[in-house]
Amino acid sequence: NALILLSKIEQGRFSDYKLVNLNEIVDSSINLFADMIKLQGVELVCNYRAPFEVEMSFTLAEILITNLLQNAIRHNLPSGYIKIESDKKQLVISNTGKPLMISPENLFERFYKDSKAEESLGLGLSIVKRVAEQEQLDVKYSFKDGIHSIRLRNGD
């Protein structure tokens, strides 16, 4: 299904474009993952200084945020935290975690994954990257002092 989704994204098959408030999608996605977050004992902090709004496919926005949150939860430490921040120009999702075992340059490539988890195909972040490219968003990864961060920034 993930490969089919990538193909649909690349072929531009999503037409439900509108001004999307990504903060609202984060909030609804958090509700979907509430049990998973609670089970891992992860603390969640949201700091929205302003809505991060993007003209994009609503469906792709949901896929983008869902993949980012799922990664932040899955690759977190027990009793770790997730911090989500936004302003008018960007959205940043940060989480505690172990250092990567692969090169950060490969993180967004298909089938590259940092863990041996069988539930992971190594496609989540390649989907994130492809959606970001499709919607003219810059996506950047960084790791510093035990904190992984992925930043989405408006490209205009």
Image: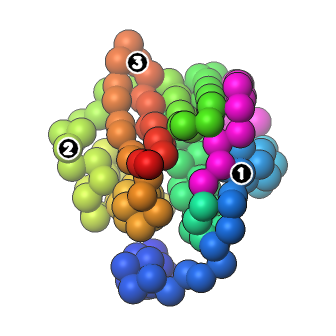
Q: Residue 95, percent across and down?
A: 52, 29
Question: Mark 1 Cα within 10 Å, few/some/many (few <14, many 20+)?
Answer: some
Q: Are marks 2 and 1 in contact (CB under 8 Å)?
A: no
Q: In the image shown, does 20 or 24 lie closer to the viewer?
A: 20
**Near-viewer residue (15 or 140):** 15
Image position of 41 (left or right of 124): right
Secondary structure at badge 2 equals helix
Q: Which residue is mark 3?
A: 146
For label 2, the residue is 105
- Identify the residue at image location x=38%, y=13%: 145
> Foreground mark, 1 or 3?
1
Residue 134 image-quadrant placement:
bottom left
Left or right of 86, for residue 144: left
Which label's residue is closer to the chain start, 3 or 2? 2
* Above/below status of 126 relative to 5: above
Q: Which residues are magenta?
A: 35-54
Residue 126 horizontal side relative to residue 80, left or right? left
Residue 145 position (above or below residue 45): above
Q: CA distance from mark 2 to mark 1?
A: 29 Å
- Distance from disc 3 to disc 2, alpha carbons, whole Å, reads 18 Å
